[in-house]
Image: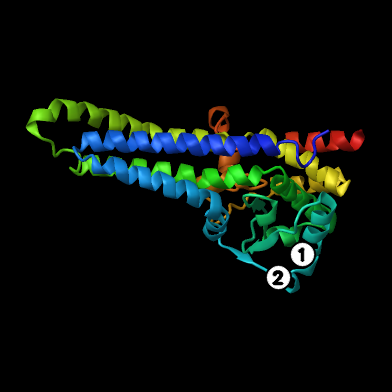
Amino acid sequence: MANLYTQVSNNVAKTWMLMSVFFVFLMGFGWILGRASNNPGIFYIFVVISVVMNIASYWFSDKIVMSISHARLIEKKDSPELYRIVENLAITGGLPTPKVYIIDTPAMNAFATGRDPAHGAVAVTTGLLRALEKTELEGVVAHEMSHIGNRDTLIATVVVILAGLIAMLSDFFLRMTFWGGGRRRDSQDSGGSGIFLIIGLVAAIIAPIAATILRLAISRKREFLADASGALLTRYPEGLARALEKLERDHTPMPFARSATSHLYIDYPLGKEERSASWFTRLFLTHPPIAERIAALRMMKAE
């Protein structure tokens, strides 16, 4: 049976691998851009950027994600029931009590961040607090606490920053090229620079796809594991199953959610249209169908 620490070492290893791939990719991109524009200094700028962003993504990604999501930190007096649920589940799971945030929106959703349990944070929406009964809210919070214990939050929040930067740099290179920045070349090296310019354009077009693949490296199986681990924490799978049913019926999009952060949430946050997309589009979604998750939880109850 899954437990809170099943994937800890695997997720930590995945995080370092992704950060290493990002470092090599960005240096290669900078080298191509430098050759295409006849400016070797660009390569060294990209080396500095890759080092700084790797450090920032590890140490500050949780704060950046909370800021992007417009989540506000609360104290126990601001939402006593929510805070007590978080504290009790932390004790049950043998985890430090995470910080608690609230997002002011009628949409129903929640997510967790943090590079390790000592720096964990849980965010829930006001819509979720209003719509769920206590046992259902416990199920959702237990699911998020499981992500923290499994170190899912480490890899998930790091990917937000790294994938976002890749997409931003790709857009920068394409704009610079088409607005004339990449056309200034010495006549003696016009052929070589032209080749590298073409390579740079191809890399810039492929880069956002690579960023999407990075997000998809966060396996959909982690949601099933977090569901199972959360059910073990509460000893009541039906609570989370009923909460997921309410989430499935709610099609209110999260106002501050973005594609780069969609994999963090307990339910896909960008609205009904994306959730009911074609089979091809669904290959690139970050969440398994809620119906499958509910069925798995109710199988646990039957056992």
* Residue corresponding to mark 2: 75
Task: Name the quarter where the C terminus is drawn.
Answer: top right
Q: Amino acid at mark 2?
A: Glu
Q: Secondary structure at mark 1?
A: helix
Q: Relative to residue 286, is residue 182 drawn left or right?
A: left
* Number of marks present in the image shown: 2
Residue furthest out toward the bottom: 77
Q: Relative to residue 108, is residue 170 drawn left or right?
A: left
Crowding around mark 1 (Cα neighbors within 10 Å: few <14, some 14 to 19, many 20+) is: some
Q: Relative to residue 183, is residue 114 drawn left or right?
A: right
Q: Relative to residue 234, is residue 177 drawn left or right?
A: left
Residue 150: where, in percent of width, then height?
Answer: 71, 42
Residue 63: where, in percent of width, then height?
Answer: 56, 58
- Residue at 43% x, 38% y is 23
Task: Name the quarter where the N terminus is drawn.
Answer: top right
* Residue corresponding to mark 1: 83
Q: Amino acid at mark 1?
A: Tyr
